Image: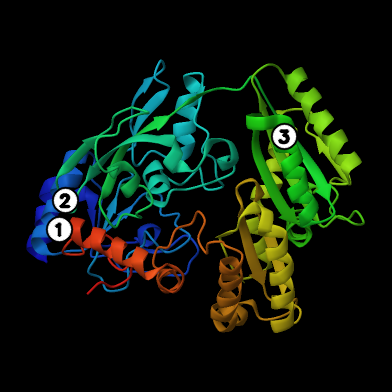
Protein backbone atom coordinates (compact mmCIF):
# COMPACT_ATOMS: atom_id res chain seq x y z
CA UNK A 1 0.00 0.00 0.00
CA UNK A 2 3.00 2.36 0.11
CA UNK A 3 2.60 3.21 -3.59
CA UNK A 4 -1.08 3.94 -3.02
CA UNK A 5 -0.40 6.23 -0.05
CA UNK A 6 2.33 8.00 -2.00
CA UNK A 7 -0.15 8.60 -4.81
CA UNK A 8 -2.67 10.10 -2.37
CA UNK A 9 -0.02 12.39 -0.86
CA UNK A 10 0.92 13.63 -4.29
CA UNK A 11 -2.73 14.38 -5.05
CA UNK A 12 -3.79 16.30 -1.92
CA UNK A 13 -0.54 17.04 -0.08
CA UNK A 14 1.20 14.99 2.63
CA UNK A 15 -0.46 16.94 5.46
CA UNK A 16 -3.89 15.83 4.27
CA UNK A 17 -3.24 12.09 4.16
CA UNK A 18 -3.31 10.97 7.79
CA UNK A 19 -2.30 7.45 8.78
CA UNK A 20 -0.90 7.89 12.30
CA UNK A 21 -1.74 9.65 15.55
CA UNK A 22 -5.15 10.08 17.10
CA UNK A 23 -7.71 9.56 14.32
CA UNK A 24 -10.62 8.81 16.65
CA UNK A 25 -12.58 11.82 15.38
CA UNK A 26 -12.77 10.02 12.03
CA UNK A 27 -12.74 6.39 13.17
CA UNK A 28 -15.29 6.40 16.02
CA UNK A 29 -18.98 6.80 15.30
CA UNK A 30 -21.15 9.49 16.90
CA UNK A 31 -22.82 7.15 19.40
CA UNK A 32 -19.68 5.19 20.29
CA UNK A 33 -21.01 1.95 18.84
CA UNK A 34 -17.92 1.31 16.69
CA UNK A 35 -14.26 2.28 16.74
CA UNK A 36 -12.99 1.38 13.30
CA UNK A 37 -9.55 1.50 11.73
CA UNK A 38 -8.85 3.46 8.54
CA UNK A 39 -6.09 2.76 6.09
CA UNK A 40 -5.84 6.55 5.80
CA UNK A 41 -7.91 9.67 6.29
CA UNK A 42 -7.77 11.80 3.15
CA UNK A 43 -8.88 15.44 3.13
CA UNK A 44 -9.21 16.84 -0.41
CA UNK A 45 -9.78 20.57 -0.89
CA UNK A 46 -11.69 20.59 -4.19
CA UNK A 47 -13.98 18.52 -6.35
CA UNK A 48 -11.11 17.85 -8.76
CA UNK A 49 -9.05 16.48 -5.86
CA UNK A 50 -11.98 14.29 -4.75
CA UNK A 51 -12.25 12.91 -8.27
CA UNK A 52 -8.50 12.23 -8.40
CA UNK A 53 -8.58 10.45 -5.03
CA UNK A 54 -11.54 8.32 -6.12
CA UNK A 55 -9.76 7.38 -9.35
CA UNK A 56 -6.70 6.34 -7.33
CA UNK A 57 -8.82 4.23 -4.97
CA UNK A 58 -10.50 2.58 -7.97
CA UNK A 59 -7.13 1.80 -9.55
CA UNK A 60 -5.82 0.19 -6.37
CA UNK A 61 -9.14 -1.44 -5.40
CA UNK A 62 -9.39 0.46 -2.11
CA UNK A 63 -12.86 0.99 -0.55
CA UNK A 64 -13.96 4.55 0.27
CA UNK A 65 -16.01 5.81 3.22
CA UNK A 66 -17.26 9.35 2.44
CA UNK A 67 -17.49 11.42 5.63
CA UNK A 68 -18.74 14.88 6.57
CA UNK A 69 -19.20 15.73 10.24
CA UNK A 70 -19.27 12.02 11.22
CA UNK A 71 -22.57 12.50 13.04
CA UNK A 72 -24.32 9.42 11.62
CA UNK A 73 -26.56 7.67 14.14
CA UNK A 74 -26.53 4.43 12.13
CA UNK A 75 -22.77 3.84 11.79
CA UNK A 76 -22.91 4.98 8.18
CA UNK A 77 -19.80 7.18 7.94
CA UNK A 78 -17.22 5.32 10.03
CA UNK A 79 -14.64 2.87 8.67
CA UNK A 80 -14.90 -0.77 9.66
CA UNK A 81 -12.21 -2.53 11.67
CA UNK A 82 -10.39 -4.08 8.69
CA UNK A 83 -7.90 -1.24 8.21
CA UNK A 84 -8.54 -1.44 4.45
CA UNK A 85 -10.90 1.51 3.96
CA UNK A 86 -10.00 5.11 3.20
CA UNK A 87 -12.02 7.77 4.98
CA UNK A 88 -12.68 10.54 2.47
CA UNK A 89 -13.30 13.58 4.67
CA UNK A 90 -15.00 16.54 2.97
CA UNK A 91 -14.40 18.99 5.82
CA UNK A 92 -11.93 21.15 3.87
CA UNK A 93 -14.60 21.75 1.22
CA UNK A 94 -16.71 24.26 3.12
CA UNK A 95 -17.13 27.22 0.77
CA UNK A 96 -20.37 29.02 0.01
CA UNK A 97 -20.01 29.28 -3.75
CA UNK A 98 -22.79 31.76 -4.24
CA UNK A 99 -26.27 33.02 -3.35
CA UNK A 100 -28.83 33.85 -6.04
CA UNK A 101 -31.29 36.18 -4.33
CA UNK A 102 -33.72 36.35 -7.23
CA UNK A 103 -33.79 32.58 -7.68
CA UNK A 104 -33.85 31.97 -3.89
CA UNK A 105 -30.97 29.50 -4.08
CA UNK A 106 -27.55 29.01 -2.54
CA UNK A 107 -24.74 26.78 -3.76
CA UNK A 108 -22.46 25.36 -1.07
CA UNK A 109 -19.76 22.73 -0.86
CA UNK A 110 -20.50 19.43 0.87
CA UNK A 111 -18.26 20.04 3.89
CA UNK A 112 -20.07 23.22 4.90
CA UNK A 113 -21.43 22.83 8.43
CA UNK A 114 -25.22 23.15 8.53
CA UNK A 115 -25.10 26.00 11.04
CA UNK A 116 -22.86 27.95 8.66
CA UNK A 117 -25.28 27.33 5.79
CA UNK A 118 -28.06 28.76 7.96
CA UNK A 119 -25.89 31.77 8.86
CA UNK A 120 -24.96 32.46 5.22
CA UNK A 121 -28.64 32.47 4.27
CA UNK A 122 -29.46 34.76 7.19
CA UNK A 123 -26.71 37.20 6.20
CA UNK A 124 -28.49 37.53 2.85
CA UNK A 125 -31.80 38.18 4.60
CA UNK A 126 -33.10 34.73 3.71
CA UNK A 127 -33.86 31.43 5.41
CA UNK A 128 -32.45 27.93 5.00
CA UNK A 129 -34.89 26.01 7.20
CA UNK A 130 -33.16 22.68 7.83
CA UNK A 131 -32.58 22.46 11.59
CA UNK A 132 -31.51 19.58 13.81
CA UNK A 133 -29.68 19.03 17.07
CA UNK A 134 -26.30 18.30 15.43
CA UNK A 135 -26.39 21.40 13.22
CA UNK A 136 -23.19 22.76 14.76
CA UNK A 137 -21.28 19.64 13.63
CA UNK A 138 -23.08 17.94 10.76
CA UNK A 139 -22.36 18.96 7.17
CA UNK A 140 -24.68 19.56 4.26
CA UNK A 141 -23.16 16.64 2.35
CA UNK A 142 -24.04 14.28 5.18
CA UNK A 143 -27.49 15.83 5.48
CA UNK A 144 -28.08 15.09 1.81
CA UNK A 145 -26.51 11.64 1.98
CA UNK A 146 -28.97 10.62 4.68
CA UNK A 147 -31.89 12.82 3.59
CA UNK A 148 -31.92 14.37 7.07
CA UNK A 149 -35.20 15.52 8.59
CA UNK A 150 -35.13 17.72 11.68
CA UNK A 151 -37.69 19.95 13.32
CA UNK A 152 -39.22 21.82 10.35
CA UNK A 153 -40.09 18.97 7.99
CA UNK A 154 -43.76 19.70 8.63
CA UNK A 155 -43.48 22.98 6.69
CA UNK A 156 -40.40 22.65 4.48
CA UNK A 157 -39.84 18.93 3.97
CA UNK A 158 -36.77 16.73 4.37
CA UNK A 159 -33.38 17.72 2.93
CA UNK A 160 -34.46 16.15 -0.36
CA UNK A 161 -37.15 18.82 -0.76
CA UNK A 162 -34.60 21.57 -0.02
CA UNK A 163 -32.15 20.58 -2.77
CA UNK A 164 -32.40 21.59 -6.43
CA UNK A 165 -29.08 20.33 -7.75
CA UNK A 166 -25.94 18.34 -6.95
CA UNK A 167 -22.34 17.98 -7.94
CA UNK A 168 -21.23 14.36 -7.51
CA UNK A 169 -18.06 12.35 -8.06
CA UNK A 170 -18.94 8.89 -9.39
CA UNK A 171 -17.29 5.65 -8.24
CA UNK A 172 -15.15 5.82 -11.39
CA UNK A 173 -13.88 9.31 -10.52
CA UNK A 174 -15.96 11.22 -13.07
CA UNK A 175 -17.72 14.45 -12.08
CA UNK A 176 -21.44 14.93 -12.63
CA UNK A 177 -22.11 18.67 -12.84
CA UNK A 178 -25.76 18.86 -11.81
CA UNK A 179 -25.88 22.15 -9.91
CA UNK A 180 -28.88 23.57 -11.75
CA UNK A 181 -31.08 25.81 -9.68
CA UNK A 182 -34.20 24.67 -11.52
CA UNK A 183 -37.50 23.83 -9.89
CA UNK A 184 -38.69 22.12 -13.08
CA UNK A 185 -36.37 19.88 -15.08
CA UNK A 186 -37.85 16.69 -16.52
CA UNK A 187 -34.91 15.45 -18.60
CA UNK A 188 -34.63 11.75 -17.87
CA UNK A 189 -34.07 9.88 -14.63
CA UNK A 190 -33.82 12.03 -11.52
CA UNK A 191 -30.18 11.45 -10.58
CA UNK A 192 -30.33 14.10 -7.87
CA UNK A 193 -32.95 12.23 -5.89
CA UNK A 194 -31.14 8.94 -6.50
CA UNK A 195 -28.02 10.32 -4.79
CA UNK A 196 -29.88 11.97 -1.93
CA UNK A 197 -30.39 9.40 0.81
CA UNK A 198 -27.95 6.90 -0.72
CA UNK A 199 -25.54 7.32 2.23
CA UNK A 200 -22.42 7.56 0.09
CA UNK A 201 -22.93 4.16 -1.54
CA UNK A 202 -23.43 5.48 -5.09
CA UNK A 203 -21.06 8.45 -5.26
CA UNK A 204 -19.56 11.36 -3.34
CA UNK A 205 -21.66 14.52 -3.09
CA UNK A 206 -19.25 17.48 -3.34
CA UNK A 207 -21.64 20.44 -3.65
CA UNK A 208 -25.34 21.27 -3.69
CA UNK A 209 -27.70 24.00 -4.82
CA UNK A 210 -30.21 24.55 -2.03
CA UNK A 211 -33.59 26.27 -1.81
CA UNK A 212 -33.86 29.44 0.25
CA UNK A 213 -36.98 31.13 1.57
CA UNK A 214 -38.00 34.64 2.64
CA UNK A 215 -37.50 35.10 6.37
CA UNK A 216 -40.81 35.19 8.27
CA UNK A 217 -41.81 38.51 9.79
CA UNK A 218 -42.37 36.79 13.13
CA UNK A 219 -41.70 33.42 14.68
CA UNK A 220 -43.45 32.41 17.90
CA UNK A 221 -43.04 29.32 20.05
CA UNK A 222 -45.54 27.76 22.45
CA UNK A 223 -45.33 24.88 24.94
CA UNK A 224 -48.55 22.99 25.58
CA UNK A 225 -49.27 20.28 28.15
CA UNK A 226 -51.59 17.56 26.84
CA UNK A 227 -53.26 14.60 28.55
CA UNK A 228 -52.60 11.88 25.95
CA UNK A 229 -51.11 11.11 22.56
CA UNK A 230 -54.63 11.13 21.11
CA UNK A 231 -55.03 14.72 22.24
CA UNK A 232 -51.59 15.64 20.88
CA UNK A 233 -52.72 14.41 17.46
CA UNK A 234 -56.01 16.29 17.86
CA UNK A 235 -54.03 19.45 18.69
CA UNK A 236 -51.95 18.94 15.53
CA UNK A 237 -55.08 18.77 13.39
CA UNK A 238 -56.47 21.88 15.08
CA UNK A 239 -53.18 23.75 14.57
CA UNK A 240 -53.00 22.79 10.91
CA UNK A 241 -56.54 24.04 10.30
CA UNK A 242 -55.88 27.24 12.23
CA UNK A 243 -52.36 28.15 11.11
CA UNK A 244 -52.03 26.35 7.79
CA UNK A 245 -48.53 26.56 6.29
CA UNK A 246 -47.45 28.93 9.07
CA UNK A 247 -47.20 25.93 11.42
CA UNK A 248 -43.49 25.18 11.02
CA UNK A 249 -42.78 22.97 14.04
CA UNK A 250 -44.75 20.44 16.07
CA UNK A 251 -42.70 18.33 18.50
CA UNK A 252 -44.06 15.88 21.07
CA UNK A 253 -42.27 14.87 24.28
CA UNK A 254 -43.36 12.20 26.73
CA UNK A 255 -43.54 12.87 30.45
CA UNK A 256 -40.71 10.48 31.32
CA UNK A 257 -38.45 11.98 28.63
CA UNK A 258 -38.99 15.43 30.15
CA UNK A 259 -38.51 14.11 33.69
CA UNK A 260 -35.01 13.02 32.66
CA UNK A 261 -34.24 16.57 31.52
CA UNK A 262 -35.60 17.93 34.81
CA UNK A 263 -33.51 15.39 36.74
CA UNK A 264 -30.19 15.85 34.98
CA UNK A 265 -30.51 19.50 33.92
CA UNK A 266 -32.61 21.22 36.61
CA UNK A 267 -31.46 24.65 35.42
CA UNK A 268 -33.66 24.27 32.32
CA UNK A 269 -36.96 24.47 34.27
CA UNK A 270 -39.22 22.16 32.28
CA UNK A 271 -42.81 23.55 32.17
CA UNK A 272 -45.69 21.51 33.59
CA UNK A 273 -43.63 18.33 34.05
CA UNK A 274 -45.07 17.70 37.50
CA UNK A 275 -48.62 18.82 36.73
CA UNK A 276 -51.29 16.21 37.34
CA UNK A 277 -52.78 14.61 34.24
CA UNK A 278 -50.01 15.76 31.89
CA UNK A 279 -48.67 12.84 29.87
CA UNK A 280 -47.08 14.70 26.98
CA UNK A 281 -45.88 18.17 26.07
CA UNK A 282 -46.06 19.68 22.61
CA UNK A 283 -43.71 22.35 21.29
CA UNK A 284 -45.33 24.38 18.52
CA UNK A 285 -43.71 26.94 16.25
CA UNK A 286 -45.68 29.46 14.22
CA UNK A 287 -43.96 31.50 11.48
CA UNK A 288 -46.02 34.46 10.34
CA UNK A 289 -45.54 36.57 7.22
CA UNK A 290 -47.30 39.67 8.62
CA UNK A 291 -46.26 40.74 12.14
CA UNK A 292 -45.60 39.48 15.65
CA UNK A 293 -48.91 40.88 16.88
CA UNK A 294 -50.74 39.00 14.13
CA UNK A 295 -48.85 35.81 14.91
CA UNK A 296 -49.50 36.08 18.64
CA UNK A 297 -53.20 36.71 18.14
CA UNK A 298 -53.51 33.62 15.94
CA UNK A 299 -51.49 31.52 18.37
CA UNK A 300 -53.57 32.58 21.34
CA UNK A 301 -56.80 31.89 19.44
CA UNK A 302 -55.52 28.42 18.61
CA UNK A 303 -54.64 27.64 22.22
CA UNK A 304 -57.99 28.95 23.44
CA UNK A 305 -59.78 26.64 21.01
CA UNK A 306 -57.52 23.77 22.13
CA UNK A 307 -58.44 24.37 25.78
CA UNK A 308 -62.11 24.30 24.90
CA UNK A 309 -61.66 21.08 22.92
CA UNK A 310 -59.83 19.39 25.81
CA UNK A 311 -56.61 19.00 23.81
CA UNK A 312 -54.55 21.19 26.13
CA UNK A 313 -54.37 21.31 29.93
CA UNK A 314 -51.97 24.24 30.18
CA UNK A 315 -49.79 26.29 27.85
CA UNK A 316 -47.27 29.09 27.66
CA UNK A 317 -46.27 31.26 24.70
CA UNK A 318 -42.67 32.48 24.65
CA UNK A 319 -42.52 36.24 25.20
CA UNK A 320 -39.26 36.73 23.30
CA UNK A 321 -36.55 34.95 21.33
CA UNK A 322 -34.60 34.02 24.47
CA UNK A 323 -37.60 32.23 25.98
CA UNK A 324 -38.27 30.47 22.69
CA UNK A 325 -34.66 29.27 22.52
CA UNK A 326 -34.93 28.00 26.10
CA UNK A 327 -37.99 25.93 25.22
CA UNK A 328 -36.27 24.47 22.16
CA UNK A 329 -33.20 23.77 24.27
CA UNK A 330 -35.31 21.59 26.56
CA UNK A 331 -36.51 19.57 23.57
CA UNK A 332 -33.00 19.20 22.17
CA UNK A 333 -31.60 18.18 25.57
CA UNK A 334 -33.63 14.97 25.80
CA UNK A 335 -30.99 12.77 24.09
CA UNK A 336 -28.25 14.14 26.36
CA UNK A 337 -30.37 13.64 29.48
CA UNK A 338 -31.15 10.12 28.36
CA UNK A 339 -27.45 9.42 27.86
CA UNK A 340 -26.73 10.66 31.39
CA UNK A 341 -29.36 8.26 32.69
CA UNK A 342 -27.46 5.39 31.04
CA UNK A 343 -27.03 3.47 27.82
CA UNK A 344 -30.31 2.95 25.98
CA UNK A 345 -31.87 1.44 22.89
CA UNK A 346 -32.63 4.11 20.30
CA UNK A 347 -35.25 4.06 17.57
CA UNK A 348 -36.11 6.33 14.67
CA UNK A 349 -39.48 5.10 13.48
CA UNK A 350 -42.23 6.69 11.41
CA UNK A 351 -45.91 5.82 11.45
CA UNK A 352 -48.88 7.52 9.75
CA UNK A 353 -49.87 10.31 12.13
CA UNK A 354 -53.42 9.01 12.48
CA UNK A 355 -52.09 5.67 13.77
CA UNK A 356 -49.48 6.96 16.20
CA UNK A 357 -51.73 6.84 19.28
CA UNK A 358 -52.56 3.17 18.62
CA UNK A 359 -48.91 2.36 17.92
CA UNK A 360 -47.81 3.96 21.18
CA UNK A 361 -50.55 2.32 23.24
CA UNK A 362 -49.91 -1.15 21.85
CA UNK A 363 -46.12 -0.95 21.97
CA UNK A 364 -46.04 0.49 25.48
CA UNK A 365 -48.08 -2.46 26.72
CA UNK A 366 -46.05 -4.98 24.74
CA UNK A 367 -42.72 -3.78 26.11
CA UNK A 368 -44.00 -3.50 29.68
CA UNK A 369 -45.20 -7.09 29.47
CA UNK A 370 -41.95 -8.42 28.02
CA UNK A 371 -39.61 -6.33 30.21
CA UNK A 372 -41.21 -5.39 33.55
CA UNK A 373 -40.09 -1.97 34.71
CA UNK A 374 -38.84 -0.85 31.29
CA UNK A 375 -38.85 2.93 30.83
CA UNK A 376 -39.90 4.54 27.55
CA UNK A 377 -38.35 7.79 26.32
CA UNK A 378 -40.82 8.78 23.63
CA UNK A 379 -40.33 12.06 21.78
CA UNK A 380 -39.97 13.40 18.26
CA UNK A 381 -41.45 15.11 15.26
CA UNK A 382 -45.15 14.34 15.59
CA UNK A 383 -45.94 16.84 12.82
CA UNK A 384 -44.41 14.48 10.24
CA UNK A 385 -45.05 11.15 11.99
CA UNK A 386 -41.48 10.53 13.20
CA UNK A 387 -40.92 9.31 16.77
CA UNK A 388 -37.70 8.58 18.61
CA UNK A 389 -39.28 5.78 20.60
CA UNK A 390 -36.32 4.95 22.82
CA UNK A 391 -36.12 2.28 25.52
CA UNK A 392 -34.32 2.71 28.84
CA UNK A 393 -33.42 -0.10 31.23
CA UNK A 394 -35.52 -0.57 34.39
CA UNK A 395 -34.48 1.84 37.11
CA UNK A 396 -31.45 0.60 39.02
CA UNK A 397 -30.63 -1.99 36.36
CA UNK A 398 -27.35 -2.43 34.54
CA UNK A 399 -27.80 -0.19 31.47
CA UNK A 400 -24.85 -1.65 29.59
CA UNK A 401 -26.06 -5.21 30.15
CA UNK A 402 -29.59 -4.18 29.14
CA UNK A 403 -28.32 -2.76 25.84
CA UNK A 404 -26.12 -5.78 25.18
CA UNK A 405 -28.67 -8.44 26.08
CA UNK A 406 -32.01 -6.94 25.10
CA UNK A 407 -31.37 -4.70 22.07
CA UNK A 408 -32.19 -7.31 19.43
CA UNK A 409 -35.38 -8.39 21.20
CA UNK A 410 -36.54 -4.82 21.78
CA UNK A 411 -35.80 -3.83 18.19
CA UNK A 412 -37.86 -6.74 16.87
CA UNK A 413 -40.80 -5.70 19.04
CA UNK A 414 -40.64 -2.01 18.11
CA UNK A 415 -39.92 -2.50 14.41
CA UNK A 416 -42.59 -5.17 14.17
CA UNK A 417 -45.11 -2.82 15.77
CA UNK A 418 -44.13 0.01 13.42
CA UNK A 419 -44.62 -2.29 10.43
CA UNK A 420 -47.97 -3.48 11.81
CA UNK A 421 -49.22 0.12 11.81
CA UNK A 422 -47.92 0.86 8.32
CA UNK A 423 -44.68 2.51 9.40
CA UNK A 424 -40.93 2.38 8.83
CA UNK A 425 -38.01 1.44 11.09
CA UNK A 426 -35.91 4.35 9.76
CA UNK A 427 -37.42 7.78 9.34
CA UNK A 428 -34.45 10.15 9.17
CA UNK A 429 -31.29 8.44 10.50
CA UNK A 430 -30.71 6.13 7.56
CA UNK A 431 -29.66 2.49 7.45
CA UNK A 432 -25.88 2.72 7.60
CA UNK A 433 -24.17 -0.42 8.86
CA UNK A 434 -26.34 -0.71 11.97
CA UNK A 435 -29.65 -1.56 10.28
CA UNK A 436 -28.58 -3.60 7.27
CA UNK A 437 -30.26 -6.79 8.50
CA UNK A 438 -33.37 -4.84 9.45
CA UNK A 439 -33.64 -3.47 5.92
CA UNK A 440 -33.48 -7.00 4.54
CA UNK A 441 -36.27 -8.07 6.88
CA UNK A 442 -38.71 -5.22 6.30
CA UNK A 443 -38.03 -4.06 2.74
CA UNK A 444 -39.72 -5.98 -0.06
CA UNK A 445 -37.63 -8.41 -2.16
CA UNK A 446 -38.56 -6.49 -5.29
CA UNK A 447 -37.33 -3.21 -3.82
CA UNK A 448 -34.11 -4.81 -2.58
CA UNK A 449 -33.45 -6.33 -5.99
CA UNK A 450 -33.93 -2.93 -7.64
CA UNK A 451 -31.56 -1.30 -5.15
CA UNK A 452 -28.89 -3.95 -5.71
CA UNK A 453 -29.20 -3.50 -9.47
CA UNK A 454 -28.64 0.23 -9.14
CA UNK A 455 -25.64 -0.30 -6.86
CA UNK A 456 -24.15 -2.88 -9.24
CA UNK A 457 -24.65 -0.62 -12.25
CA UNK A 458 -23.10 2.49 -10.70
CA UNK A 459 -20.49 0.89 -8.45
CA UNK A 460 -19.71 -2.54 -9.96
CA UNK A 461 -16.60 -3.03 -7.82
CA UNK A 462 -18.44 -2.12 -4.59
CA UNK A 463 -15.90 0.46 -3.46
CA UNK A 464 -18.31 3.18 -2.30
CA UNK A 465 -19.14 2.76 1.39
CA UNK A 466 -19.30 -1.04 1.05
CA UNK A 467 -21.38 -2.95 3.56
CA UNK A 468 -23.58 0.04 4.36
CA UNK A 469 -27.29 0.14 3.51
CA UNK A 470 -27.40 -3.06 1.43
CA UNK A 471 -24.73 -4.98 3.33
CA UNK A 472 -22.24 -7.34 1.62
CA UNK A 473 -22.97 -7.83 -2.06
CA UNK A 474 -22.26 -11.00 -4.06
Q: Which mark is residue 241?
A: 3
Report crowding for label 1: few under 14, some 14 to 19, many 20 or more residues within 10 A (C-alpha): many
Location of residue 469 in the rendering, given as x and y in whole percent from the top left corner: 36, 64
Q: Which mark's residue is nearer the viewer, 3 or 1?
A: 3
Report crowding for label 3: few under 14, some 14 to 19, many 20 or more residues within 10 A (C-alpha): few
Along the line of sight, the residue nearer the viewer: 95 or 175: 175
Answer with left or right where residue 416 lies relative to residue 54: right
Location of residue 299 in the rendering, given as x and y in whole percent from the top left corner: 78, 30
Q: Secondary structure at mark 2?
A: helix
Residue depicted at 8% across the width and 59% down the height: 59
Answer with left or right where residue 52 lies relative to residue 397: left
Residue depicted at 22% across the width and 49% down the height: 15
Location of residue 297 in the rendering, given as x and y in whole percent from the top left corner: 81, 23
N-terminal label among 2 and 3: 2
The residue indicated by pointer 2 is 53
The quadrant of the image that shows the N terminus is bottom left
Q: Secondary structure at mark 1?
A: helix
The residue indicated by pointer 1 is 57
Say whether residue 466 is visible: yes
Say whether residue 337 is visible: no
Q: Which mark is residue 18?
A: none
Amino acid sequence: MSDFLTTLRNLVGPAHVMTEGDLSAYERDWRGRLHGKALAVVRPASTDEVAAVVRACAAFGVPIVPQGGNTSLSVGSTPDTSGREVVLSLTRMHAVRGIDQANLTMTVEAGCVLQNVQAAAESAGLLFPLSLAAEGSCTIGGNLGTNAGGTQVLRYGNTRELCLGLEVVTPQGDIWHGLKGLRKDNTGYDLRNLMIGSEGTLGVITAATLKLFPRPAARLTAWAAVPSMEQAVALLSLAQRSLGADLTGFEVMGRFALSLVAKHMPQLRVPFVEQEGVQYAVLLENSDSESEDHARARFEALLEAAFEAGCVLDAVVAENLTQAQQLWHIRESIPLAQAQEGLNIKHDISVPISRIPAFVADTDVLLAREIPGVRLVNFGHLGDGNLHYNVQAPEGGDAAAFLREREDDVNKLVYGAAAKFGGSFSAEHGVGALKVDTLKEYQSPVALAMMRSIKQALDPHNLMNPGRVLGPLP
